[in-house]
Image (tube, grey):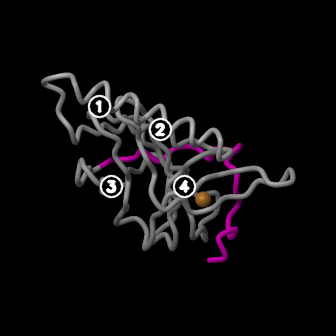
């Protein structure tokens, strides 16, 4: 995503926030998580995994996803998938902003939660629990179903250098 586009989104979020702030009865810290699923490990030796979901902010102010913990892996962080010279890459995202009244999709090829040092391979049909920490909404627990390998996912095992 280009800087210009990001700035546009930031400006839109600020405008929306300003409008919603005038509306009585709108509660802050209202983040909803939908459709959480984790990619099943392709190999028993897999050390990394990816989790996808939609984050919706029903609050009157933008919120930010600051940290993620899970029993399924030693590390969990937000990554962004991107194309660089026709090569699919990814990079860590420090804080993921969810605009007021808006939502952010974590999906194959885009934003995702990257699990590092999996304690066990992720098996289809399993569930894993993640705890998301938001700046305003606080802790939000998420159950993610483990599903089929998403073949269009932007990165391969070992690309984080683990
Ligand atoms: Cu990643």
Q: Are marks 4 and 3 in contact (CB under 8 Å)?
A: no
In front here: 124 or 54? 54
The Cα atoms of the two marked residues, 3 and 1, are separated by 16 Å
Circle number at residue 50: 4
| Element at label 4 | strand
Name which residue lies at 70% across and 68% down. 159
* Point 53% across, 59% down: residue: 93
- Rounded to the nearest whole Å, what is the CA distance between mark 2 and mark 3? 14 Å
Region in magenta: 142-162
Residue 138 lies, in percent from the top left, at: 23, 53
| Residues packed near mark 3 inside 10 Å, few (<14), some (14 to 19) or many (20 plus) | some
| Mark sitting on residue 104 | 2
Q: Look at the numbered discs 4 and 1 and tell me whether their residues touch, using CB distance below 8 Å.
A: no
Is residue 145 in the magenta section?
yes
Q: Nearer the viewer, mark 4 or mark 3?
A: 3
Along the polypeptide, which appears first: circle 2 or circle 3? 2
Is the stretch drawn in magenta largely helix, strand or loop? loop
Q: Which mark is residue 6?
A: none
Q: Which residue is mark 3?
A: 132
Q: Residue at x 50, y 38 (%)?
A: 105
Q: Position of residue 139 (x, y in %)?
A: 24, 54
What is the CA distance from the residue labelled 4 to the residue labelled 1? Answer: 25 Å
């Amino acid at each position: 995503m280009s800087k210009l586009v990001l700035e546009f989104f930031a400006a839109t979020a600020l405008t929306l926030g300003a409008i919603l702030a005038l509306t009585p009865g709108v509660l802050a810290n209202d983040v909803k998580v939908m459709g959480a699923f984790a990619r099943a490990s392709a190999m028993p030796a897999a050390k990394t995994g990816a989790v996808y979901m939609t984050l919706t902010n029903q609050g009157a102010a933008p919120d930010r996803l600051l940290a993620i913990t899970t029993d399924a892996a030693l590390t969990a962080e937000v990554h962004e998938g991107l194309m660089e010279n026709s090569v699919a890459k990814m990079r860590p995202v420090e804080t993921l902003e969810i605009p007021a009244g808006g939502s952010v999709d974590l999906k194959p090829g885009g934003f995702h939660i990257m699990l590092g040092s999996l304690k066990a391979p992720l098996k289809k049909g399993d569930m894993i629990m993640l705890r998301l920490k938001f700046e305003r909404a606080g802790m939000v627990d998420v159950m993610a179903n483990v599903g089929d390998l998403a073949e269009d996912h932007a990165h391969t095992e070992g690309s984080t250098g683990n």
